[in-house]
Image: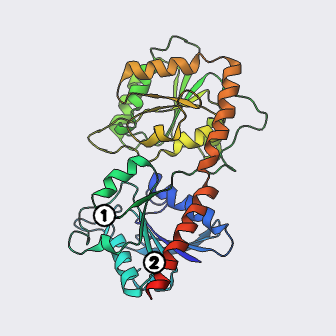
Amino acid sequence: MHIVHVTPSFFDERSLIGGGERYVDELAKAQAKMAGCTVIILSFAEKRMRFVRHDVRYEILPSSHFGQFSIHNPFSLRHFFFLRRADVIHVHQLCTFVSDVAALAAKVFRVPLVGIDHGGGGAWVLNTRLPVFRWYDRIFAQSRQAVDPLKNHFDGSIELIPGGVDLERFCPSEDGSVGQTEILFVGRLMPHKGVDLLIQSFKKLEQRDWKLRIVGRPADASYFEKLKALASGHPIYFETDLADDDVVRAYQGAGVTVLPSVRHAADAPAPELMGFTVLESQACGTPVVCSDSGPMREFVSEGKTGWVFKSGDESSLTAALNMAVQASQSDRHALSERCCKHVRQFSWGTVSEKYLCAYRDVLRVKVKEK
């Protein structure tokens, strides 16, 4: 099966790096391992690029940014004829111009078309002018939280395929030890991530022998300065350029990982559509504390692999942190074991197999129609 993923931006240091791009990259990598599958990621940048990574072929086409078009919503028509030989076109980020062009190509060439959204997009699109969304054969969501926004555009059923996480890469430490007295945050440093709330709660912990480690790239300079000011004089450490392998070790060495995303922040009305951090931490055997602002709670077994607190509520977060840091050594070992067992259902192998089954269903329907 020849699968082509269409994404406005791609996971690479030279481009925008976020959860949506990572999702495409990880899914394609898992699919490329499956027998009989060839996988292409078709994306856009300032200049033409072509490379292979993890047996996935990347075709990066030139795009333009003008007026309403940007890295989030690039302008390009070059991929139209590129898609005619695909067995399945899988579109990511539904509300972009290039996604709509891909949908048009699928309709013209009668290629099965499926799609999933990751919360990105732009203002100038074709789907406000043409019945683009009717051309999709199947729509997917990565969490229950992600389903409702899609109902505004699609009348048919939306298939839920939750996950995933790379269990080969994210795994407990080889020595079997559990986390130390360290609270960890992993993610981009942006206001909707709620890191300022985490710092304030950390300073109120009953146990004073813990430290807070904040790992992530500053995406908002003024917000980063605010965080550093809040952290001054406390055992709070920032690491803004940690290598991927070091991030895994950070998960393995932490006592708990926190994702304190804030509901309805001005710059992100839907702060998370899945939350990779929650799955990656549990895969490393580290329990999590997360807010109820998004779908993160869907991936946590409350009280067994982590704790969920009320979004934006400092006292609720402080209470959850106190439960995490007060766990005994035996409790931590039990938490670690439950975390590893819990995330198996969300592995990329499981996710890619579910997608492949869905692709085959769509292909069978297309054959009957012909």
Residue placed farthest to the right in the image? 175
* Relative to 199, 223 lies left or right: left
* Residue 153 picture quarter: bottom left
Above or below, 148 relative to 14: above
Q: Residues within 10 Å of mark 2 (few under 14, many from 20)?
A: many
| Residue toward you, 29 or 13 | 29
Disc 2 marks a residue whose amino acid type is Pro
- Which residue ends up furthest to the bottom in the rendered image? 370
Chain-order first, disc 1 or disc 2: 2
> Which residue carries the number 1 mark?
155
Q: Position of residue 231 (x, y in %)?
A: 44, 23
Mark 1 residue element: loop
- Residue 96 is situated, as x and y percent measured from the top left of the image, at 32, 66
Q: Quadrant of the C terminus?
A: bottom left
Instruction: Say which mark, if any, is on residue 112.
Output: 2
Q: Is residue 42 above or below residue 281?
A: below
Which residue is located at x 37 percent, y 32 percent?
225
Work out how far the residue at label 1 is from the one at label 2, CA to CA, in angstroms: 18 Å
Instruction: Please give left or right for residue 119 compared with residue 188 in the image.
Output: left
Above or below 63: residue 213: above
Q: Name the image quarter holding residue 65.
A: bottom left
Q: Which element is circle 2 on?
A: loop
Residue type indicated by callout 1: Asp
The image shows residue 165 at horizontal and vertical percentages of 59, 50
